[in-house]
Amino acid sequence: MAPKFDHHAAEARWQAAWDAAQSYRADDDSPRPKAYVLEMFPYPSGRIHTGHVRNYTMGDVIARTRRAQGYEVLHPMGWDAFGMPAENAAMERGVHPGGWTRDNIAAMRAQLKRLGFALDWSRELATCEPEYYGQEQALFLDLLEAGLVYRKESAVNWDPVDMTVLANEQVIDGRGWRSGAIVERRRLSQWFLAITDFAEDLLAGLGTLADWPEKVRLMQENWIGKSQGMRFTFQVADDARAATDSPTPDPSRMREGRNFDVFTTRPDTLFGASFAALAPDHPISLSLAETNPGLAAFIAECRAGGTATADIEGQEKKGFDTGLSVIHPLDPTIRLPVFVANFVLMDYGTGAIFGCPAHDQRDLDFARKYQLPVTRVVAPEGEADAPIHNEAYTGPGRLVHSRFLDGLTVEEGKAAVIARAEAEGWGTGTTVWRLRDWGVSRQRYWGTPIPIIHCEVCGIVPVPKKQLPVVLPEDVSFDVPGNPLDRHPTWKHVDCPQCGKAARRETDTLDTFVDSSWYFIRFASGPADQPFDRRIAEQWLPVGQYIGGVEHAILHLLYARFWTRALAHIGRISVTEPFAGLFTQGMVTHETYSRPQGEGVAPLYFSPAEVERSSQSAILKADGLPVEIGRVIKMSKSKKNVVDPDAYLETYGADAVRWFVLSDSPPERDLAWSDAGIDGAARLVQRIWKLADEAADAPQGVMDADDKLLRLLHKTIAAITADIDKLQFNKAIARLYELVSAIERAPASPTRRQAVITLLQLCAPMVPHLAEEGWARLGQPGMIVDAAWPVADPALLVDDMVTIAVQVNGKLRDSFEAAKGAPRETIEAEALAREKIVRALDGKAPKKVIVVPDRLVNLVA
RNA sequence: GCGGACGUGGCGAAACCGGUAGCCGCAGCGGACUUAAAAUCCGCUUUCCCCUGGAAGUGCGGGUUCGAGUCCCGCCGUCCGCACCA
């Protein structure tokens, strides 16, 4: 009986051998074609989770295959090491964020090494180290100098207990996610990156990303949100109406400086306008509120609550009549009342709209509430003038009740109104974007310090580059809420680099998305004295294959695209799209185990480690009683369905774990982690090992070219190469199983021995330790990582016999073997002569015969 | 509400261009080996029936075609993203 494959020994042996040979070191000066394979770098939370294992295994298969195919491969790893969890750990456990983070990195690095990934560890980086963030500060200053960084006041979610800004995702039901305090909307001075300068470019660039998922491109397109329309000015009329709840107006005072711009995507519906509305934060609203307590109260009411989506949803449309009216731009005799309305957003367009109730649902709701006129101006083709009830009409059609526009289509109407507005000088065709500039200020300690000094005399002064990096102080405390940098006794006090007077450091740090916006460039080239060496970086970039979770489809990928373009814009690099190929993999899921705890109480969940799972049921180890097996869902701490890869690495070995995460599910879909699945993977590892072990003593010599096994082998080479290219690892694995079965059945022969050697090469990207061990057992020269990828012989890919299906009226009745390329007549004759077919036709001659060469015959009776 | 993806055995899934639906794995059933078990190996496994065969079958209803999982039209369901975006 052959000895079993010993994963502990093999992993140790080959990981040491690869290390000693520096097998995965990427050579900048290699003459070979370059391939940059990258997986999204992890946040060092403490432990590698199954999602990481899946992500990095996929990348590893690509990297190893490319290497075997003769590419110089760059496959690096690093740590997205700044961020809030480190500060939370500091607050909860009294540890320093830096120590906590670096300990986590050490633990996770060991776990990744244990999985045997083909990574170039010499390029490892952590964003929390000054060598990295100092260079980021230099790039920030470059962008500042180029006018792509600016400071502005903006509304933020402010947590009054934790004394910090919260992202929208951190506001839950209007309360801070940590403190539970009611979130306020505050205006704060914040640093911004001018991503909107590149809106058009970022949108156009999506069209060049052929190797990105369509879904991600669409998500980015929607996020950028280009809308074309018209911007025009409303003149405020002299004759003020009597307004509700306002003091007797003085018309001349009211009019002064109160004309305002609106944006619309539907200039064609202008004759359907029945009101105008301003955002509560609009400057005119605010100025009117100074003398109008009713309006001031209304604005205050609108401001209550956070900026989160949940707060906005379902809110009733409300307005406040300002008493002003504006003049309709196409007919000066028409006056429209001006409201301040809660559904108008200051951040989009101009912060003011014209309302056309017949063709916009929100405007219609508003008009019904305030008894404003509703006039249809677009009618569907052939359907003249039905009244509008409670549903606005937004479909296509022709214009009605619109004077010079009558009879035009919607598109023609838009063009006509814009042409007229531009000719008369009261409006212009224009484009607005949903995308906003990127606010990067965070009132946090554990992030890249923004390299700016505030001087009372000189204003905003960049830290001179010679003084970089601005290093985070280590002696900080987290015993009170707020930003420790701001409270630090000395750190922020510096002399102004320009005038030398006492000044103050910026105490905000950069959003961690900045850190991840250029790490792939630093991997390609990471000199000590500058962010990157342009020549070397450009040899590797763009990343050929980038792999990560779809949750980064918008923010990270958009920011990285922007940052790269910004660097190109200031002439530091010629690459504009950082990731040529993108793949978004699915999540790893697991079933849940629970026991009900009575009505209205959440069930009690148990972790997979606490449960003994048999094929049909599961019992709790502690008491031997059954637990309920729940749905297969994303791993989460609250449902306790998280598994730790370490235990599996110990029991089954890296190769079995790697094989399992690649098998069964297509990589873009979710993968259900199961012990049964890993058992299957471990069995396969032993089967392959047994083949290698037996083949070591098998006869060597000349192979039989007609051997069926040889044909299968070459078909498998071709298929697996194509499957890996398309990242269809599940299909590659199904084919490997077929090949393994076929070899097992084949008698010992030189062909069989060669098949085993090739099999080891084909599965080496997935199970590298096993492959090396088998390669050595078979006495092959060197290491399998240095062996060239097998090439399929085209002559062996075509069969000389094919199966011809015979259908009667489209239904399969019989099939037979025929020589490949046999003439139609031969096939037809054979089909008609088959006993089953004669019976099926029941003596009748077929009316029509369809012959598809090498495939089928269909007889139409 | 807008945009998108998906729907195939008990489960994860295959199926090139419209051409034999269900490769491969998991689970299950039967058998061999064994004192026994594990491990391993062999076989079966879409459903139904009047079982040497036949019928139905890829969410539902239509259509195009000699032929549809695949193309077209209309529904239903699930998931994802965005959302008072003017």
Image (cartoon, helix red, strand yellow):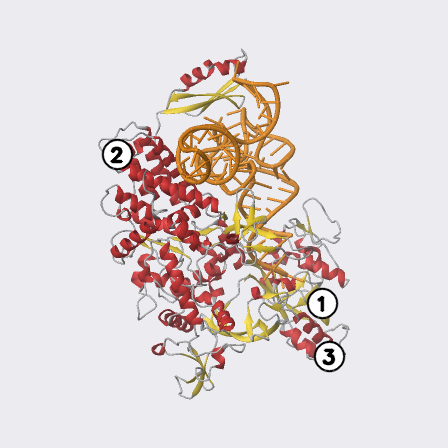
- Read off the residue under disc 3: A250
In this view, the mark in front (2 or 3):
2
Tell me the subunit letter for badge 1: A
Three-letter code for the amino acid on which mark 2 is drawn: Ala
Quadrant position of the N terminus of chain A in the picture = top left
Residue A698's disc is: 2
Tell me the subunit letter for badge 3: A
First reached walking from the N terminus: tag 1 or tag 2: 1
- Nearer to the camera, A615 or A710: A615
For image coordinates 36% across by 46% down, the residue present is A767
Q: CA distance from mark 1 to mark 3?
A: 22 Å
Could you tell me which secondary element the residue under label 3 belongs to?
Answer: loop
Residue A369's disc is: none
- Nearer to the camera, B40 or A323: B40
Residue A72 visible in this rendered orientation of the protein:
no
Three-letter code for the amino acid on which mark 3 is drawn: Asp
Tell me the subunit letter for badge 2: A
Q: CA distance from mark 1 to mark 2?
A: 87 Å
Residue A319's disc is: 1
Q: Residue A832, relative to residue A436: is it above or below?
A: above
